[in-house]
Image: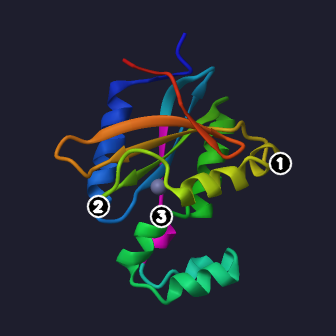
């Protein structure tokens, strides 16, 4: 039995999102029930936004560092989900009796595997998910580095990365 079942249409939507945002990273959430994904929520990557004013709500040292970079450089470092988009997605999931299943983002120039930063952020978030009443999600990466987009999904737990068993249908 697969860890996750993701409809082909949702996978195609993720790839479309990645292509629209390239050279910036796209990000979003997949929700469903019992590992069966049924909903996609796009979220803005505020790291990729001009000015990065919204970063003030995050760690100020990190924000100051990001402010000095061009938006293209910033996007290559990481992604930070827009909290308003995140909250409205979370609300919609609750209203529809869905659970968070997957956090996705793209790597425009890098392979479909978590970067050191991705692993660090996922590890930091392990403590946060239960506090905001969400299950620990799988992490889906879409790479656009080759002409054929590549999609891979992982579990990131206690700093270690293992492939998730995903059925596409
Ligand atoms: Zn990444």
Closest to the observer: 146 or 83? 146
Q: In this view, does 48 lie above or below 155?
A: below
Left or right: 87 as drawn, with respect to 116: right
What SS does tag 2 mark? loop
Label 2 close to label 1 by CB (< 8 Å): no
| Disc assigned to residue 110 | none
Label 2, label 3: how many angstroms apart (C-alpha)? Answer: 12 Å
Question: Does 47 lie within the magenta span?
Answer: yes
Q: How far apart are marks 3 and 1 (CA)?
A: 23 Å
For disc 3, the neighbor class at 10 Å (few under 14, some 14 to 19, many from 20) is many
Tell me: residue 135, above or below residue 132.
above
- Under tag 3, what secondary structure? loop
**Residue marked by disc 3:** 45
- Pinpoint residue 87: horizontal percent, then vertical percent: 65, 54
Within 10 angstroms of label 2, few (less than 14), some, or many (20 or more) residues? some
Residue under numbered circle 1: 131
Q: Could you tell which of marks 3 and 1 lies nearer the N-terminus?
A: 3
The stretch in magenta equals: 40-49
Q: Is 86 on the left or on the right of 70, as rendered?
A: right
Q: Earlier in the sequence, mark 2 or mark 3?
A: 2
> Along the horizontal axis of the image, is 149 left or right of 106?
left
**Residue 140, percent across and down?**
47, 40
Residue at image coords 61%, 23% = 33
Report which residue position mark 2 lands on. Answer: 22
């Amino acid at each position: 039995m697969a860890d996750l079942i993701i409809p082909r249409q949702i996978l195609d939507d993720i790839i479309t999102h990645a292509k629209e945002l390239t050279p910036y990273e796209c990000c979003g959430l997949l929700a469903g029930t019992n590992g069966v994904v049924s909903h996609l929520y796009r979220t803005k990557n505020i790291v990729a936004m001009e000015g990065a004013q919204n970063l003030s709500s995050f760690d100020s040292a990190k924000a100051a560092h990001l402010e000095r970079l061009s938006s293209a450089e910033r996007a290559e470092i990481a992604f930070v989900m827009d909290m308003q988009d995140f909250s409205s997605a979370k609300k919609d999931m609750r209203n529809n009796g869905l659970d968070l299943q997957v956090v996705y983002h793209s790597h425009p120039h890098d392979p479909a595997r978590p970067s050191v930063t991705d692993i660090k952020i996922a590890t930091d978030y392990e403590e946060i998910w239960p506090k905001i009443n969400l299950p620990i999600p799988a992490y889906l990466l879409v790479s656009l580095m080759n002409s054929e987009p590549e999609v891979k999904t992982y579990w990131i737990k206690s700093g270690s990365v293992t492939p998730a068993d995903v059925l596409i249908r």
